Amino acid sequence: METPNLNYIKEISGGDLDFEASILEVLKKEFPVDCLIFEENFNKKSYEEASNNVHKIKHKISMLGLNEGLQLASKFENDLKKCEVKLYEKFVEILKKIHVYLG
């Protein structure tokens, strides 16, 4: 099972530690809010909005090097547009890993 990492952020930073720290700070600030909004929309069965939330979260998943997670999120995003929710639990597991990592 893959785990979050900073490889991509380090790659794009070119060794600029201040840049890396600022990106990490943005992730720590935005990620919990994005997840909360997703959960609210999902629980209201506002699947189109939840799909939009997943789209936004996908970028953070990608930045944290979770390639398999990104593929699952993309599939889940499309499924939500068709009101299909079977990938919900797997998607939430990815979110939990990221929450722990950013902790």
Image: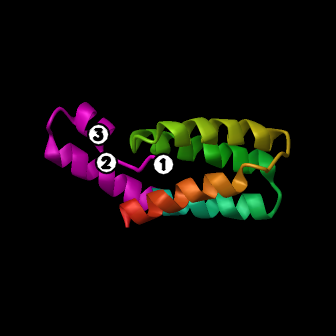
| Side of 66 relative to 41 (left or right) | left
Dividing the picture into quadrants, the one containing residue 78 is top right
Q: Is residue 103 left or right of residue 39?
A: left
Q: Which residue is mark 3?
A: 7
Where does the magenta region start and end? 1-30
Circle 2 sits in a helix, a strand or a loop, which is it? Answer: helix
Q: Position of residue 36 (x, y in %)?
A: 60, 64
- Tell me the kind of residue under disc 3: Asn
* Mark with earlier residue (2, 3): 3
The answer, for residue 34, to whether it is visible in the render is no
Circle 2 sits on which residue?
23
At 40% from the left and 40% from the top, the residue drawn is: 65
Residue located at (83% from left, 58% from top): 45
Residue with the most extreme front position: 1
Q: Helix, strand, or loop for circle 3?
A: helix
Q: Is residue 27 magenta?
A: yes
